[in-house]
Image (tube, rainbow, N blue to C red):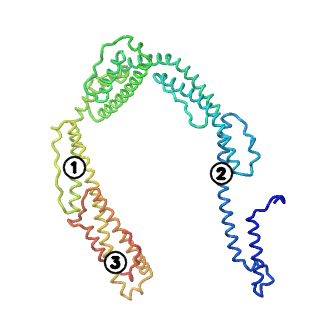
């Protein structure tokens, strides 16, 4: 401390108190402590004083750290504004107040306020340019979609330059729209020719395209094409060219997908159905045909082949019915309960859609019965395994009381010890499998599984609730049912 500086009154009081404590302590020091300093003798009391000082120090440090963090944040904010305005980051007036955080904070806030006022003019310039970008984009959107340049942070000089460059680019782009519109019109004319659709004015064209799209999706009847209005497409505005171009491309995509689906279905039918039907165009000829006409021709071929294929559904239906009967018989043998027979109508007298529905139901029923049979078969097998294991355990328990078994061969004794250790865990595992399969059956079919006309699983649960396993004979692990 500088000698010229006046000592704080509080520091004087602390020193005076310590001095008085030492003086008074000398009067009451025990005889064996006279050689020690009084504060050493008062160590526990002084530790309380030190702890209070440490607490004050910790609080002051915490407050200083928070203030330091705020100053760092403000310095970063000021640096960001200076960078945005392309100013130097020199300390300037802040150099005189580095050692006091509150003064630094106050000076920084004043600096930031001035910088913000200067930055606002820069932001206004940037805003004018972004508004111009949006205006240009609205115009270009008729023929093209542009990403509007937006920025919400501190506006730098580079952002203004980027916005100005974007405005210039969009203005050039606006001039290119007419050229692109012409290209789209050319593309529309080629696509219409490929699709086999005549030219129409915009509104009539959109209506016709909608009708053709519905025909492609439903594939019923035949779309009626209108009279050609030569030169109508060339009169499209940029917006009209864009909408028709998108619609024509969508129809071409859907039409191509429809042709592919019909060709795949036709190929499957040709593999399944033996027919000498002729008159259809070759694949090479079909490729030269307009898509709309190809869809109609392929749809016609598929319908003819479906009629022939319909005669084979009976064989598939018979196979599914055989599976149903086989699984039903096996399930009845396990459950001991006769299942109600499901009768399906004669498939020949049904429409094609009803035939498909009946066949789907039969296949689903066969699959469900197969699943039920697999579950019941496993339950039955595990119940049988459990019964055999319990019989072995009963016999083993009876033999365990025979002292003569200790004089058997070492191989037999090892075998008995292995069974003694594994019997109960194996029993628990088998029962766990039974309960899991039973739950699976309930979830899938909404009823309890029956084995030989009995609720075997419930009987096992009842038996478990009353059984007592001889722990003197068998090693019992944790039951993980």
Q: Nearer the viewer, residue 293 or 95?
A: 95
- In the image, taking residue 364 as reference, residue 23 lies left or right, namely right
- In the image, taking residue 438 as reference, residue 424 lies left or right, namely right
Residue 171 location (% of width, % of height): 55, 20
Q: Secondary structure at mark 1?
A: helix
**Up/down of 350 relative to 251, above or below:** below
Residue 428 location (% of width, % of height): 36, 71
Q: Are marks 1 and 3 in contact (CB under 8 Å)?
A: no
**Up/down of 275 relative to 44, above or below:** above
Q: Nearer the viewer, residue 264 or 176?
A: 176
Of discs 3 and 2, which sits in the foreground? 2
- Measured in 3D between alpha carbons, the distance from the residue under mark 1 to the one under mark 3, in whole angstroms, is 43 Å
Q: Quadrant of the C terminus?
A: bottom left
Rendered residue at 67%/69% (across/down): 52
* Residue that badge 1 annotates: 322
* Residue that badge 2 annotates: 69
Residue 88 location (% of width, % of height): 73, 37
Instruction: Name the quadrant containing residue 75.
Output: top right
Residue 331 location (% of width, % of height): 23, 58
**Marks 1 and 3, the one that precedes in the sequence:** 1
* Residue that badge 3 annotates: 393
Mark 3 surroundings within 10 Å by alpha-carbon count, few (fewer than 14), some (14 through 19), many (20 or more): many
How many numbered discs, if any? 3
Q: Are marks 3 and 2 in contact (CB under 8 Å)?
A: no
**Marks 2 and 1, the one that precedes in the sequence:** 2
**Up/down of 103 relative to 304, above or below:** below
**Up/down of 320 relative to 434, above or below:** above
Q: Secondary structure at mark 3?
A: helix
């Amino acid at each position: 401390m500088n000698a010229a500086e006046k000592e704080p009154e509080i520091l004087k009081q602390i020193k005076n108190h310590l001095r008085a404590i030492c003086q008074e302590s000398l009067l009451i020091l025990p005889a064996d402590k006279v050689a020690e300093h009084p504060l050493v003798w008062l160590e526990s009391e002084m530790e309380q004083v030190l702890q209070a000082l440490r607490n004050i120090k910790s609080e002051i440090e915490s407050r200083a750290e928070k203030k330091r963090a705020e100053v760092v944040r403000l310095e970063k904010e000021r640096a960001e504004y200076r960078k945005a305005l392309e100013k130097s980051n020199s300390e300037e007036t802040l150099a005189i107040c580095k050692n006091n955080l509150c003064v630094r904070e106050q000076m920084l806030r004043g600096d930031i306020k001035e910088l913000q006022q200067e930055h606002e003019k820069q932001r206004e310039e940037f805003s004018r340019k972004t508004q111009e970008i949006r205006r240009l984009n609205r115009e270009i959107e008729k023929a093209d979609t542009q990403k509007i340049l937006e920025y919400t942070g501190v506006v730098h000089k580079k952002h203004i330059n980027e916005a100005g460059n974007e405005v210039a680019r969009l203005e050039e782009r606006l001039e290119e729209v007419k050229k692109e519109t012409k290209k789209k019109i050319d593309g529309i004319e080629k696509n219409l020719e490929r699709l086999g659709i005549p030219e129409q004015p915009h509104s009539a064209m959109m209506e016709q395209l909608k009708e053709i799209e519905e025909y492609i999706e439903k594939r019923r009847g035949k779309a009626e094409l209108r009279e050609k209005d030569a030169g109508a497409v060339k009169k499209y505005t940029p917006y009209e060219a864009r909408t028709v171009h998108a619609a024509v491309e969508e129809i071409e995509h859907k039409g191509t997908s429809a042709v592919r689906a019909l060709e795949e279905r036709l190929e499957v039918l040709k593999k399944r159905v033996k027919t000498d039907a002729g008159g259809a165009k070759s694949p090479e000829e079909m490729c030269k045909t307009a898509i709309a006409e190809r869809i109609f021709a392929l749809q016609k071929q598929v319908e003819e082949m479906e009629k022939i294929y319909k005669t084979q559904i009976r064989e598939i239906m018979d196979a599914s019915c055989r599976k149903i009967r086989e699984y039903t018989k096996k399930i009845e043998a396990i459950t001991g309960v006769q299942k109600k027979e499901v009768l399906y109508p004669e498939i020949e007298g049904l429409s094609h859609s009803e035939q498909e529905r009946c066949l789907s139901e039969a296949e689903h029923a066969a699959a469900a019965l197969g699943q039920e049979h697999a579950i019941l078969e496993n339950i039955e097998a595990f119940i049988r395994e459990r019964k055999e294991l319990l019989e072995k355990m009963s016999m083993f328990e009876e033999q365990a009381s025979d002292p003569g078994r200790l004089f058997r061969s070492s191989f037999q004794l090892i075998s008995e010890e292995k069974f003694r250790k594994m019997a109960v865990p194996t029993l628990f595992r088998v029962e766990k499998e039974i309960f899991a399969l039973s739950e699976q059956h309930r979830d899938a079919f909404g009823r309890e599984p029956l084995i030989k006309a009995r609720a075997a699983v419930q009987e096992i649960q009842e038996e478990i609730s009353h059984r007592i396993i001889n722990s003197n004979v068998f090693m019992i692990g944790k039951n993980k049912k």
